[in-house]
Image (cartoon, rainbow, N blue to C red):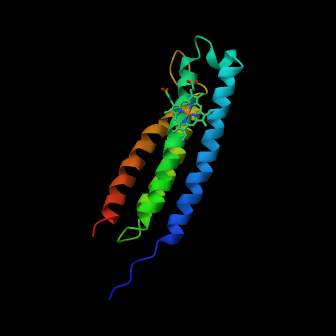
C-alpha cells in the first residue's frame, strides 16, 4: 500500500502567507476608505486618477491573491507531487502584482503610471506558470 504524500508544511506556509497578506491589503482598503471619508484631495482630485487607479488595483489584487493562497493551501493537501513550482510562483505573483501597482502610483506623469508597473506583466507570467504547475501537481 502506498502512503499519501504529506505536504502539510507547504500548506501551512501558504495559510500563514495568505492570511498575513490579507491583513496587509485589508488595512490598505481601510486607508483608501479613510481617504474617501476625509476627502483627501491628493487621492481624489481630478488629475490623480491614474494614482488612484493604481492604489485601487493594488488593494484589489492584493486581497484577491491572498485568497488564492488560502485556496492553494487546501489544494496542496490533494496534490500527488509536491507543488513547489506553483508555491514559488504564487508567492512571487503576490509580490509582483500588487507591488507593481503600488510602485506604479509613484513617478509617472501625463496619465501614465510610474516605471514600477513593469512588475505587473512579470506577475501575470508567474500567475500563469503557477496555475499550470498547480494543475500538473493535481494529476492522479
Ligand atoms: C477580501 C476583502 C476585499 C476584497 C476582495 C476587495 C476587493 C476590492 C475591489 C475588487 C475593488 C475595486 C472595485 C472597483 O474599482 O470597482 C475594491 C475597492 C475598494 N475597497 Fe476593497 N476589497 C476587500 C476589502 C476591503 C476592506 C475591508 C475595505 C475597507 C473598509 C475596502 C475598501 C475599499 C475601497 C475604499 C475601495 C475603492 C477605492 C477607490 O476607488 O478609491 N476593501 N476592493
In the displayed structure image, the side of residue 8 where residue 36 appears, left or right: right
| Residue sitting nearer the eye, 108 or 17 | 17
In the displayed structure image, the side of residue 86 where residue 36 appears, left or right: right
Question: Furthest residue to the left?
Answer: 140
Residue at x 57% of width, y 23% of height? 52
Question: Furthest residue to the top?
Answer: 46
In the displayed structure image, the side of residue 140 where residue 9 appears, left or right: right
Residue 136, by quadrant, is: bottom left
Residue 137 image position (x, y, % from top left): 34, 65
- Image quarter where the C terminus lies is bottom left
| Residue sitting nearer the eye, 32 or 43 | 32
Whether residue 116 is visible to the viewer of this picture, yes or no, is no
Question: Furthest residue to the right?
Answer: 38
How many numbered markers are drawn? 0
Compared to residue 9, the image places residue 35 above or below, namely: above
| Residue sitting nearer the eye, 110 or 45 | 45
Residue at x 43% of width, y 68% of height? 77
Compared to residue 57, the image places residue 63 above or below, namely: below
Residue at x 50% of width, y 51% of height? 92
- Image quarter where the N terminus lies is bottom left
Residue 59, by quadrant, is: top right
| Residue sitting nearer the eye, 124 or 29 | 29
Residue 50 image position (x, y, % from top left): 53, 21
Compared to residue 11, the image places residue 47 above or below, namely: above
Whether residue 140 is visible to the viewer of this picture, yes or no, is yes
Residue 82 image position (x, y, % from top left): 41, 70
Q: Taking the image as four quarters, which one is ligand 1 found in?
A: top right
Amino acid at each position: 500500500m502506498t502512503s499519501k504524500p504529506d505536504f502539510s508544511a507547504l500548506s501551512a506556509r501558504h495559510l500563514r502567507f495568505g492570511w498575513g497578506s490579507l491583513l496587509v491589503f485589508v488595512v490598505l482598503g481601510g486607508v483608501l476608505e479613510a481617504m474617501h471619508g476625509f476627502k483627501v484631495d491628493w487621492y481624489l482630485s481630478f488629475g490623480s486618477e491614474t494614482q488612484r487607479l493604481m492604489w485601487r488595483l493594488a488593494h484589489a489584487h492584493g486581497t484577491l491573491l491572498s485568497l488564492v493562497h488560502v485556496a492553494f493551501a487546501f489544494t496542496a493537501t490533494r496534490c500527488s507531487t509536491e507543488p513547489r513550482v506553483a508555491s514559488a510562483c504564487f508567492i512571487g505573483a503576490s509580490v509582483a502584482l500588487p507591488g507593481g501597482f503600488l510602485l506604479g502610483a509613484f513617478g509617472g506623469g501625463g496619465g501614465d503610471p510610474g516605471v514600477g508597473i513593469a512588475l505587473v506583466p512579470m506577475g501575470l507570467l508567474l500567475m500563469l506558470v503557477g496555475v499550470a504547475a498547480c494543475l500538473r501537481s493535481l494529476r492522479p
